[in-house]
Every structure is written in C-alpha cells, then in structure tokens.
Amino acid sequence: MESRDITGSGWQTFSGLVLALGGIFAVVEGLMAVYKSSFFVGNAVFVFSGLNTWGWITFGLGIIAVVSGLAVFGGREWARWLGIGIAGLGALGALLTAQAYPLWSLMIMGVYLLAVYGLAVYGVRESAALYGSGTRDESSTMQAPEGSSGISEASDRGRRAA
C-alpha cells in the first residue's frame, strides 16, 4: 500500500468525522433555536428574519452534513463535493459568529477548512476496492527479480551505465 493511500484514507476518515459530528451539533443547535430560544442571547440581531428561521436553516444544513459525512465513509464521489460545500458553509458560519465566540469560532473554522483540504486534495476512495479484497495491484509494486538484491542491483546497473 502506498503512503499516499494511507494518508488519503486518514484524511477521508477525518473529513467524514468532521462532517458527521459537525452535522450532529448543527442539528442540535438548530432544534434548540427552534424549540428553546431562551438558550440563546435575547437581543441578538439577525441579517434577515429571526432565530426560528435560522434554527431551521441550521437544522437543514446539519442533516445534509450528516448524510454527506456518512457518504464520505462509503466512498461516494458526490459526497466529496457536497462535503466541500457544506464544510465551506460551516467555516463561513463559524466566521460569522466570531464576534460572539471568538476562540471557538476560529477553532471550528480551522477544523472545517482542514476537512475541505482533505476532501479537495485526497477526495474519497472506494474502501472496498482498496482494502476489502486483500490483494494488491501487482502493477503498482516493483519487485526485484529472483536472485537479485533489489535496490543494490539497480544502483550497480546505474553505475555501470554511467
């Protein structure tokens, strides 16, 4: 297994967890905004509408984030792009709440941006195709011929050619 495959699967797992857990937190926060608005600051000013509307928006984005996070674990390509969009919106939302919770917002924004990085650079991989079969692609591995010592044989041939 190549180092990039191992790194990519780590980023895939991290991104899926961030999306799923962030989505669960968003669902809880959205439901609290809708049903228990006394939990939030009473004199908050919103760009448009009120706390109830923003609660439903947060709830909907949280559901989408959970679905996307679980689909990232399944290796779905559409989950990669949906996850990038949802994590980007989460980072933007964290930036917009920085006035109320500065340190928390910056930490959450950083985590979401790392999830965007992981999905953008490494994407998603078919887990079953990479790890489930138990076999490796022979064309991707270089094997030394029988009776040779591999690297030392190749370096000897390189010295003789020069």
Image (tube, rainbow, N blue to C red):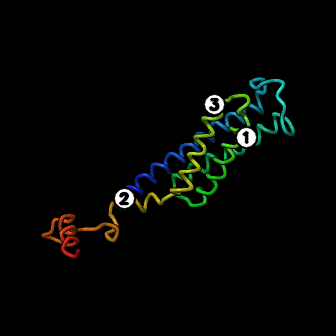
Is 88 left or right of 137, judged from the image as shown?
Answer: right
> Please, what is the three-letter code of the amino acid marked with disc 2?
Glu
Q: Which residue is mark 3?
A: 104
* Residue 116 place in picture, x, y as percent: 59, 50
Picture layout, residue 43 above or below residue 20: above
Q: CA separation, marks 2 and 1? A: 39 Å
> Please, what is the three-letter code of the amino acid marked with disc 3?
Trp
Identify the residue shown where x is 59% and y is 56%.
79
Picture layout, residue 88 above or below residue 48: below
Looking at the rendered image, the disc whose residue lies closer to the viewer, 2 or 1, is 2
Is 45 left or right of 135, judged from the image as shown?
Answer: right
Is 83 left or right of 158, judged from the image as shown?
Answer: right
Q: Which residue is mark 1?
A: 58
Q: CA separation, marks 3 and 1? A: 17 Å
Res. 2 mark: 2
Of the pair 86 and 113, the residue shown nearer to us: 113
* Residue 69 place in picture, x, y as percent: 57, 48
